[in-house]
Amino acid sequence: MRRLIDLHPVRRREAAALADPAGTQERLLRELLRRASATEWGQEFGFEALAVDPDPVAAYRERVPIHGYEDLRDAVRRMREGQADVLWPGRIRHYAVSSGTVAAGKLIPMSAETARANSDFALAAALAYTAATGSARWLGGRLLTVPGRVEDDPAFPGTVAGEMSGLMYVFGPWYVKRFFQCVGDDILFLPRWEDKLRAIARATCRLDVRSMAMVPSWAVVLFPMLVETYRKETGRPARTVRDVWPGFRVFFSGAVALSSYEALLREQIGGDAPMHFMESYGASEGVFSARRSPDDEDMVLAVDSGVYYEFVRMDDTGPTPRRYSLAEVEVGVRYRMLVSTCSGLWAYAVGDVIRFTSLRPHRIVVAGRTGEMLDRYGEAVFGEEARAAVEHAARETGSFVRDWHVTSLPPAGEIMPRHRWVLEFVGERPDLETFARRIDEWLQRVNRHYTIRRECGAFAAPELVAVPPDTFRAWLHATRDRVGAQTKVPRMREDPSIAEAVIERAETIHRTST
């Protein structure tokens, strides 16, 4: 079977790109610059000359500065008004909501070229899974894809805005929707997520669902609904997802870190047959990497999906940090990622931190967001370390954490600075003192700065606050105009306002329930 799959054009193109990643990226950069040379930005930065430079990689980073969203907000507004040839050739009608709302948030242009690249990426992930497992049995049942919302933008007639997962679904292959997808658009694009999930549970509780593509933070909400709906609709006993969908085999995950939810998902899914998870990493700016086997913990970087990558070391905080190409990166270093894309983003700071685990092929793990770091008191704890600490404590205590947030607390009297962890558990709550010790021991194991401060008494042990089920979801609904597929709970903030608001929301829930 693998030989047959490897003959597919998408697999052949991917294999060729991975065999020469640096050359593939350089050729891609030349093509992006050539295509956009007549645009406003292309003329401003001299793309035509850069495209034929003997060393386009060096010339590009010398000529084109790093950009944030504010640098292109006005360009995006004019593009939404109908202007063509601004960031990318032609008129762009589709926009991915990166944060905030359609009216006031960050909207990332999505060209037809990006849409095609994203579709090929998704197909490559499905082919990779089939090749790795040597079985296509998962294709004998139905697929449940649960995308985010997409809608016409009334402020800019003729344009469409929505979450990346929704746009990928809209541009997805017709045959997948026709022959595999098990829920219609009338359900998938319901405006409220809770209503959508309940409708999905009713629509699928009698179907042979074998695969799913969904944000894991919402899957842990859907699965209990599914089991309860099945019991009510059929009158049959059911405890786990496999009691409802006995053929369920593969979960295609994205948008948030799978590791934070995998243990809970496995518990909810149940059953004796193997359950496979295929994680991908993407954002509103594009899709970047995916697992190539269920046994992988890292992801292979997609080097030929319309995205040219550059990287800046996290410890380089100067005004003009050095930018590294794919040929120059090192294993184990944390990098901020910059992308230039076939939708007209140029040296754009995505806001994520990645770390390479291998260079042949280039494999990465997502180490957090650029703003995810607690260092007010010199402890220098990154988001990746905090997430691993929670997962370690959960394993050691046999518990499941659905959501969490950590902040810094200042000294108070004789109490030294410390971290306050706000945690929402699923099922039985563990002993909080034990859980705190496990977090503390993990951070001391992996973080030298934290260890030194703990050993010298300059930093106190973690403080834990457990909140009732659905507290974080209630907080999201109270603080966001719209909660969608990719709405995420911020994991770390030095400012304690989020932690205080979540705790206050928990107290409100407690008063209401009593």
Image: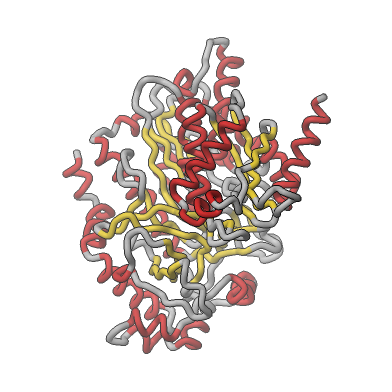
In the rendered image, is residue 455 in sight?
Answer: yes
Q: Is residue 293 left or right of residue 462?
A: left
**Residue closer to the observer: 343 or 442:** 442
Query: Which residue does the image show at 32% across and 64% down from the upper left?
Result: 330
Q: Position of residue 267 (x, y in %)?
A: 48, 26
* Quadrant occupied by the N terminus: top left
**Taking the image as drawn, is residue 82 in sight?**
no
Farthest residue to the left: give it. Answer: 3
Image quarter of the C terminus: top right
Q: Position of residue 88 (x, y in %)?
A: 48, 75
- Image height check: is 19 above or below 421? below
Give me the residue at 44% from left, 86% from top: 63
Q: Residue at x 59, y 29 (%)?
A: 426
Display colour scheme: secondary structure
- Above or below, 104 relative to 265: below
Q: Which residue is at 53% across, 35% downward?
A: 219
Which x, y percent locates residue 423?
A: 63, 38
Mark count = 0
Q: Is residue 503 left or right of residue 242?
A: right
Q: Position of residue 277 (x, y in %)?
A: 39, 37
- Horizontal side of 460 relative to 388 (left or right) equals right
32, above or below 160, in the image? below
Q: Nearer the viewer, residue 384 or 294?
A: 384
